[in-house]
Image (spheres, grey):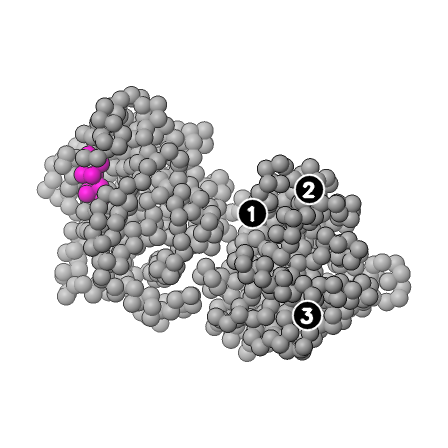
């Protein structure tokens, strides 16, 4: 719907209650609204004339910077659309007037709630002579509220029509869309799944928004939309002002008021990539002031730095800084079956701990402990702090469903709980499936211990390490590995820490092999890689193709290559193989049958398969045994990936054998212990300290 203010409303600078009622009803129903003749058309045309000649310079700068969304694409074909920010450094052109337009603010105060926050300024240039369109998408790569929380006010600097690439919008799509509607891929995670687009087109087809210069197009950020080709002979520029509801609390906002908000450090480096604030040039502070209708959230930069950021939008620009209930959190949902709302009582600091992947503690050295089929396996070594020498060592074996995960950053509580309390800490990689078997992965773990016993005296000092006193610790898949390693290592470890690993693959929780879902029962797949490519990857048995470090299913969506490289303290690239593996993890994990996980086609019969499953189930290998290392168990009571009963049964079996055990079970999901980053975190004394005390007792060590 398009609404044009009457002469009386223009004079008053606001819509009448009746007009506002109509506007809000339309905006809520459709997800977009056009307000005509609410700004000086001559002002807009002048900005257009001044910005058109910038096109080539802007495009070259964006391509050279490689910034996200620098150029919009349709499939693999570049369109002629690119980001083109407003000329805020030239106040005489009047772009500062747009954010406080009274008609826009009146609508947004009603739609988003009182005094929304002005959080970003941006622009789009649809180059003349375009032929390619964008795929249907939203501007959100994260879980978001289902209520109105953010709006883009898009100002057209020339008449907006289908001929010059007027935006395609999908009326009403904002009211039902969720993050699950997107193609979950690092390159395409804005796109809506094609089957959903086709289904909606049959009942609620899209339209192209038309608007005259001097008007504004308001778009709910949840709305499906797509950039269209500008087939005219003149570039078409549209400027945007972004607003969010105050209750949403965008992450990292900085209140405007004075250039001193830019610290010396920030002046040197520019804004942090996580700051969702309007980045504006110093010298125009007086033009961007908060009032009773809007709160301006901005950072004022020196002119040269402002120009670097003028045409950019940051990856996580629109995320909230609120600690969301667990059932809305993408990381929790990606690691196990989605939790019901009843599980929302999970501790909020746990949810917050999943915002980014774990960071590697400083002070390590990297080494290679093994080469197999040309594949090098890395190992990290952290010398003990506050130790009594010679000190014991502890190894950590990562999780990742046996096909993913990395060795770069151990469990959160290991640095403060073990290394800072006198244990040398070691983190080995292992070859990831499906190119190797679980047995081979266990052997990688065994070989890493042999390497430690031989080489740690040279690395740490012969008088600094006692290689006969060691502990092995594993989480999830790594927990499975250490439970099996405990039956192979000689000399055995002084203790094992088994954190939520599978110890019985024949447990009915994992399904009956070959009796799982039929293809028609499985969720449809759409990603960067096709199902045929994923199936080919699952069938790949060439051991030279092994990865030793890979992403969990969503790490590439939570941070960039540079961010992850900084967190892991290594140069990590999102190569084709890495991105494919991330999708393979998603694809296999979301299909609830065991055939993929155990590489069923390697076996000639169900009998062979069942026999093999038993041979890699640590609890079943205890039959007839009389010894096993003392073992500590950590598990989340609400874990739906690996049920807590797995740990309970293993612990009970060990006690029957007379093996010392300790069990720490807390209400929480898979990887519930990620929250414990230091000993002041509530729950440390109940769930972490008993494990540490158990270790010290059986290692015979006190730093």
Q: Relative to 264, is 682 on the left or the right?
A: left
Q: Quadrant of residue 224?
A: bottom right
404 sits to left or right of 257: left
The label shown at residue 255 is 2
Relative to the observer, which residue lies in front, 700 or 84? 84
Residue under the point 22% across and 61% down = 542
Residue at (72%, 52%) from the top-left corner?
89
Rendered location of residue 185, percent (x, y): 44, 61
Prevalent SS, magenta region: helix
Residue 521 picture quarter: bottom left
* Visible residue check, residue 121: yes
Q: Residue 162: x and y, percent? A: 66, 77
Provide residue 312's location: percent of width, then percent of height.
Answer: 60, 55
Q: CA distance from mark 2 to mark 1?
A: 15 Å
Q: Nearer the viewer, residue 432 or 192?
A: 432
Q: Residues within 10 Å of mark 2 (few under 14, many from 20)?
A: some
Q: Which residues are magenta?
A: 445-453
Vertical arrangement, residue 82 with respect to residue 621, above or below? below
Residue 274: mark in rendering: 1
Q: Is residue 454 above or below residue 163?
A: above
The residue wearing badge 3 is 236
Badge 3 or badge 1: first in the primary sequence: 3
Residue 675 badge:
none
Q: Nearer the viewer, mark 2 or mark 3?
A: 3
Which residue sits at x=73%, y=41%?
257
Q: Residue 600's image quarter? A: bottom left
Task: Point out the image quarter for the N terminus.
Answer: bottom right
Total number of numbered labels?
3
């Amino acid at each position: 719907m398009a609404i044009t203010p009457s002469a009386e409303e223009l004079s008053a600078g606001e819509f009448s209650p009746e007009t506002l009622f109509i506007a809000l009803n339309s905006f809520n129903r459709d997800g977009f609204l056009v307000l005509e003749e609410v700004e000086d058309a001559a002002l807009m045309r002048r900005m257009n004339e001044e910005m058109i000649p910038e096109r080539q310079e802007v495009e070259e700068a964006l391509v050279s910077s490689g910034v996200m969304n620098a150029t919009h694409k349709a499939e693999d074909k570049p369109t002629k659309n690119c980001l083109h920010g407003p000329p805020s450094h030239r106040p005489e052109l009047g772009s500062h007037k747009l954010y406080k337009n009274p008609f826009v603010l009146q609508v947004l105060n009603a739609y988003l709630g009182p005094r929304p926050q002005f959080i970003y300024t941006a622009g789009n240039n649809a180059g003349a002579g375009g032929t390619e369109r964008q795929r249907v998408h939203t501007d959100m790569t994260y879980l978001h509220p289902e209520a109105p929380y953010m709006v883009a006010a898009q100002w057209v600097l020339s008449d907006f029509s289908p001929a010059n690439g007027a935006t395609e919008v999908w009326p009403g799509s904002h009211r039902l869309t969720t993050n699950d509607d997107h193609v979950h891929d690092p390159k395409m995670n804005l796109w809506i799944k094609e089957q959903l687009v086709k289904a909606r087109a049959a009942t609620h087809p899209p339209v192209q928004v038309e608007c005259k210069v001097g008007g504004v197009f308001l778009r709910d950020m949840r709305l499906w939309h797509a950039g269209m080709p500008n087939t005219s002979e003149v570039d078409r520029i549209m400027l945007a002002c972004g607003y969010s509801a105050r209750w949403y609390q965008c992450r990292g906002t900085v209140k405007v008021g004075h250039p001193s908000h830019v610290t010396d450090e920030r002046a040197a480096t520019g804004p942090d990539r996580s700051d969702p604030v309007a980045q504006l040039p110093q010298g125009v502070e007086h033009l961007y002031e908060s009032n009773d209708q809007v709160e301006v959230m901005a950072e004022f930069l020196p002119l040269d730095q402002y120009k670097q950021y003028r045409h950019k939008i940051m990856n996580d620009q629109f995320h909230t800084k609120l600690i969301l209930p667990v059932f809305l959190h993408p990381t929790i949902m990606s690691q196990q079956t989605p939790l019901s709302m009843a599980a929302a009582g999970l501790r909020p600091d746990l949810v917050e701990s999943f915002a980014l992947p774990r960071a590697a503690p400083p002070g390590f050295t990297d080494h290679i402990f093994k080469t197999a089929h040309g594949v090098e396996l890395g190992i990290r070594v952290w010398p003990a702090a506050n130790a009594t020498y010679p000190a014991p060592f502890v190894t950590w074996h990562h999780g990742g469903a046996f096909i993913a995960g990395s060795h770069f950053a151990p469990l959160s509580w290991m640095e403060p709980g073990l290394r800072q309390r006198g244990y040398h800490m070691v983190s080995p990689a292992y070859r990831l499936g499906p190119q190797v078997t679980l047995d081979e992965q266990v052997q990688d773990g065994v070989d890493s211990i042999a390497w430690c016993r031989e080489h740690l005296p040279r690395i740490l000092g012969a008088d600094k390490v006692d290689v006969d006193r060691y502990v092995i610790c594993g989480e999830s898949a790594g927990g499975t590995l250490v439970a099996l390693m405990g039956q192979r290592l000689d000399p055995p470890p002084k203790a094992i820490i088994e954190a939520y690993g599978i110890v019985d693959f024949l447990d009915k929780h994992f399904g009956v092999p070959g009796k799982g879902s039929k293809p028609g029962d499985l969720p449809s797949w759409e990603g960067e890689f096709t199902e045929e490519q994923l199936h080919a990857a699952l069938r790949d048995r060439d051991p030279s193709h092994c990865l030793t470090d890979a992403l969990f299913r969503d790490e590439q969506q939570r941070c960039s290559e540079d961010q992850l490289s900084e967190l892991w303290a290594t140069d990590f690239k999102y190569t084709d193989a890495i991105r494919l593996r991330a999708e393979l993890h998603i694809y296999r994990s979301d299909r609830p049958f065991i055939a993929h996980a155990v590489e069923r086609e390697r076996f000639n019969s169900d009998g062979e398969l069942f026999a093999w499953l038993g041979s890699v189930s640590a609890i079943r290998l205890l039959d007839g045994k009389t010894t096993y290392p003392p073992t500590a168990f950590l598990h989340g009571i609400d874990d739906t990936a690996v049920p807590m009963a797995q740990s309970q049964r293993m612990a009970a079996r060990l006690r029957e054998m007379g093996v010392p055990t300790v069990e720490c079970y807390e209400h929480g999901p898979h990887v519930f212990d990620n929250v414990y980053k230091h000993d002041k975190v509530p729950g440390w004394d109940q769930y972490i300290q008993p494990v540490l005390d158990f270790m010290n007792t059986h290692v015979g060590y006190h730093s």
